[in-house]
């Protein structure tokens, strides 16, 4: 259902206006292979995916 919403279909790069948060920190620029914090991996803290909005 979410296919293509987080990553581009062709390049497989993360879309620019999707932000990732773990343990209250922005993980948007972390490597996709970086291990998640232990609290998130154990389910004690949420992993949030947030659609950002650009504008001025």
Image (cartoon, rainbow, N blue to C red):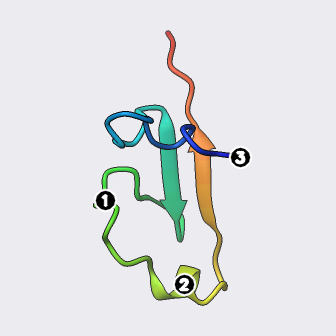
Compare marks 3 and 1 and give the one earlier in the sequence.
3
Secondary structure beneath disc 3?
Answer: loop
Horizontally, residue 51 falls left or right of residue 27, namely: right
Q: Quadrant of residue 51?
A: top right
Q: Are marks 2 and 1 in contact (CB under 8 Å)?
A: no
Q: CA distance from mark 3 to mark 1?
A: 24 Å
Pinpoint residue 15: horizontal percent, then vertical percent: 43, 35
Q: CA distance from mark 3 to mark 2?
A: 23 Å
Horizontally, residue 28 falls left or right of residue 18, namely: left
Please tell me which residue lies in front, 39 or 8: 8
Q: Which mark is residue 41?
A: 2
State the residue lying farthest toward the right.
1
Q: Are marks 3 and 2 in contact (CB under 8 Å)?
A: no
Q: Quadrant of residue 8?
A: top left
Q: Which mark is residue 1?
A: 3
Residue, x 48% and y 88% (percent of image)? 38
Q: Which residue is mark 1?
A: 30
């Amino acid at each position: 259902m979410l296919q293509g919403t987080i990553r581009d279909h062709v390049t497989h790069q993360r879309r620019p206006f999707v932000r990732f948060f773990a343990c209250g920190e922005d993980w948007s620029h972390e490597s996709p292979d970086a291990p998640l914090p232990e609290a998130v991996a154990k389910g004690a803290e949420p992993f949030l995916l947030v659609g950002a909005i650009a504008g001025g």
